[in-house]
Image: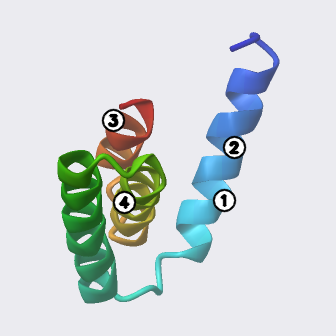
Amino acid sequence: MTPLRTPFLALTLTITLAGLSACDRDAGRKQETVGKIESGVGTVIGDKDLKKQGKTDQVVGNVKQGELKDAVKDAKK
């Protein structure tokens, strides 16, 4: 990642999290759980698209919960 993109990404994530602060944590937990299941099933049956969708849902679920650290960790996987 270029040095100019890093501060922009951090600012974007901060603004996004501030806007999502009103989101329901339970909805985030549900979406994260569904993502874990989708990712696992995708791995077992060899469906790359399902696995990818599951990883996306995990990241979005973590962001909705305000767990940026976990969201970034899941996004890097």
Task: Name the residue carrying label 4.
Answer: 54
Q: CA distance from mark 1 to mark 2?
A: 6 Å
Q: Earlier in the sequence, mark 2 or mark 4?
A: 2
In the rendered image, the vertical position of residue 22 relative to residue 17, given as above or below: below
**Local SS, label 1:** helix
For the residue marked with disc 1, what is the amino acid? Ile
Q: Which quadrant of the figure contains the C terminus?
A: top left
Dot 2 and dot 4 residues touching (CB under 8 Å): no
Crowd band around label 4 with a 10 angstrom C-alpha radius: few (<14), some (14–19), many (20+)? many
Residue under label 2: 11
User: Which residue does the image show at 42% across and 30% down from the upper left?
Assistant: 76
Q: Which percent across, then down, holds residue 74?
A: 34, 42
- Name the kind of residue labelled 2 in the image: Leu
Pointers 4 and 3 in contact (CB under 8 A)? no
Pointers 1 and 3 in contact (CB under 8 A)? no
Could you give the CA–CA distance between mark 1 and mark 3, rounded to whole angstroms?
19 Å
Q: Earlier in the sequence, mark 2 or mark 3?
A: 2
What residue sits right under mark 3 in the picture?
Answer: 73
